[in-house]
C-alpha cells in the first residue's frame, strides 16, 4: 500500500512486515529509505528530511566530517540563539575542531571524544571550559539524531570533567568585626549588622 503525498515530498509505503517505509530522493537522483512503526511517524521523518535538504544538511552521516556538520549546525542554531550564546558556541566548536574535525560523523566514538577532553585539559583549558565544549557537542549530535543523520549520540557515553567546587568558609569572630568596621560607610553595612546579630543570637 502506498500513501499518496504531494509531488516532491517523498513516498510512503506500508511494507508486508507491517512497518511503514518512507523514501526521499536526494541530490544526484538516488533515493534514501527509512522506516517507522506508523504512517504518522514516517511522514514526520519525511518532513525532517525535506527540511534538512532545504538547509543543505546531509540526509545521512556518510563521509560528512564533524567539522562540516558542526559548521552547518552552528549556522542554523545561531539564528535562534542570543548573540553572546552563539559566540560562546562558536568558541567551543573551534576548540573541538582541531582534534575531531576531520572525523566522519559515523566514525565518531566515545573514546575519541574522551581523548579530546583529556587533550584540552592538558593544553591548559579549565575543566569548566571543557565541560561547556562537551555540552555544545552533545547538543549538536542530539540534533543530528533528531534530523535522522546519525542513529546514536556518542557523547552520552562520555563523562566530561567536572569543575572543582569551592568550599564555603565561614568568617570567624575577628573577621566579622573587621568586616563591620571596614564597611561602616558602605550601603551594605546594615545588612552585615543584621547578619551579625542573627549569628550572635544563634550561638
Image (cartoon, rainbow, N blue to C red):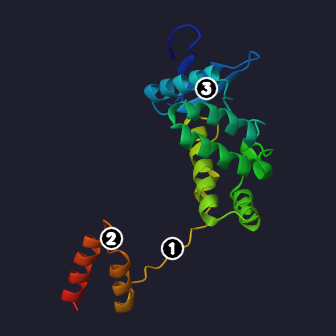
Kindly report which numbered mark, 3 or 1, lies closer to the viewer in this rendering.
Answer: 1
Please name whichever residue, 156 or 191, is drawn nearer the observer in this view of the structure: 191
Residue found at the far left of this picture: 201
Task: Residue 77: name its quadrant.
Answer: top right
Task: Residue 159: name its quadrant.
Answer: bottom right
Cβ–Cβ under 8 Å for marks 1 and 2: no
Q: Kindly state the secondary structure of the residue where label 1 is placed.
A: loop
Please give left or right for residue 100 compared with residue 75 in the image: right
Q: Tell me the residue at 67%/24% (across/down).
A: 56
Which badge, 1 or 2, comes first in the chain's sequence? 1
Please name whichever residue, 63 or 89, is drawn nearer the observer in this view of the structure: 89
Residue to which mark 1 is pinned: 165
Q: CA distance from mark 3 to mark 1?
A: 41 Å
Q: CA distance from mark 1 to mark 2?
A: 33 Å
Q: Tell me the residue at 65%/49% (across/down).
A: 92
Does 4 sit above or below residue 133? above
Residue 76 shows up from this direction: yes
Which badge, 2 or 3, comes first in the chain's sequence? 3
Counting the numbered discs, the total is 3
Q: Tell me the residue at 60%/46% (across/down).
A: 88
Q: Kindly state the secondary structure of the residue where label 2 is placed.
A: loop
Q: Tell me the residue at 72%/51% (across/down).
A: 95
Residue to which mark 2 is pinned: 185
Q: Position of residue 72 (x, y in %)?
A: 67, 32
Residue to which mark 3 is pinned: 52
Cβ–Cβ under 8 Å for marks 3 and 1: no
Amino acid at each position: 500500500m502506498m500513501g499518496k503525498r504531494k509531488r516532491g515530498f517523498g513516498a510512503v509505503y506500508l511494507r508486508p512486515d507491517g512497518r511503514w517505509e518512507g523514501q526521499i530522493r536526494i541530490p544526484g537522483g538516488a533515493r534514501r529509505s527509512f522506516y517507522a512503526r506508523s504512517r504518522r511517524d514516517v511522514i514526520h521523518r519525511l518532513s525532517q528530511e525535506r527540511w534538512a535538504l532545504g538547509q543543505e544538511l546531509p540526509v545521512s552521516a556518510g563521509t560528512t566530517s564533524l567539522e562540516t556538520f558542526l559548521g552547518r549546525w552552528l549556522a542554523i542554531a545561531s539564528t535562534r540563539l542570543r548573540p553572546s550564546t552563539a559566540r560562546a558556541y562558536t568558541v567551543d566548536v573551534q576548540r573541538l575542531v582541531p582534534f575531531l574535525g576531520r572525523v566522519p560523523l559515523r566514525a565518531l566514538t566515545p573514546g575519541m571524544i574522551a581523548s579530546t577532553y583529556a587533550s584540552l585539559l592538558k593544553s591548559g583549558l579549565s575543566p569548566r571550559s571543557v565541560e561547556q565544549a562537551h555540552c555544545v557537542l552533545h547538543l549538536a549530535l542530539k540534533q543530528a539524531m533528531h534530523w535522522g543523520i546519525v542513529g546514536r549520540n556518542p557523547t552520552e557515553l562520555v563523562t566530561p570533567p567536572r569543575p572543582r567546587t569551592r568550599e564555603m568558609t565561614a568568617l570567624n569572630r575577628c573577621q566579622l568585626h573587621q568586616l563591620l568596621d571596614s564597611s561602616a560607610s558602605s550601603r551594605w553595612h546594615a545588612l552585615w549588622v543584621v547578619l551579625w546579630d542573627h549569628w550572635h543570637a544563634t550561638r
